Image (cartoon, helix red, strand yellow):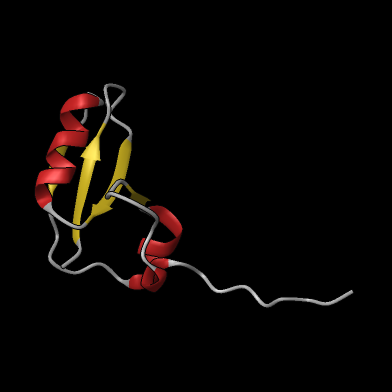
């Protein structure tokens, strides 16, 4: 299940993260000097697609990608 976190960097700027587990988020925060502020249970999918950074293993799951039409020229 996808986990979400609101974090802050050294400059107090918000950084929004999501991954497959909270452990992945905690590890990423330790390595990048981020402080976890909140771990919401639900985030609107539109917000996730536009503002959250995928830090989980592998490619971002298709559920969280924005589909784009293919145009033929």
The answer, for residue 4, to whether it is visible in the render is: yes
Residue extending furthest toward the front: 58
Q: Is residue 54 above or below residue 10?
A: below
Query: Would you place residue 42 above or below residue 39 in this image?
Result: below
Above/below status of 70 relative to 56: below
In the image, residue 36 above or below residue 47: above
Instruction: Quadrant for the C terminus, please.
Output: bottom right
Q: Residue at x 18, y 44 (%)?
A: 25
| Left or right: 52, with 23 as reference point | right
Image position of 56 (left or right of 37): right
Q: Residue at x 12, y 39 (%)?
A: 26
Q: Is residue 35 visible?
A: no
Residues 58 and 17: in front is 58
Residue at point 37%, 73% (across, down): 63
Residue 38 relative to residue 69: left or right: left
Q: Position of residue 43 (x, y in %)?
A: 25, 67
On the rendered image, what quadrant is the N terminus found in? bottom left
- Please give the name of the residue rendered at 83% of the width and 77% of the height, measured from the top-left corner: 72
**In the rendering, at what x and y percent does residue 50 appear?**
45, 59
């Amino acid at each position: 299940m996808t986990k979400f976190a609101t974090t802050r960097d050294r400059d107090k700027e918000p950084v929004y993260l999501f991954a497959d587990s909270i452990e992945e988020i905690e590890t990423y925060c330790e390595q990048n000097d981020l402080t976890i502020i909140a771990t919401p249970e639900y985030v609107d999918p539109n917000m996730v697609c536009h503002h959250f950074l995928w830090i989980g293993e592998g490619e971002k799951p298709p559920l969280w990608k924005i589909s784009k039409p293919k145009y033929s020229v």
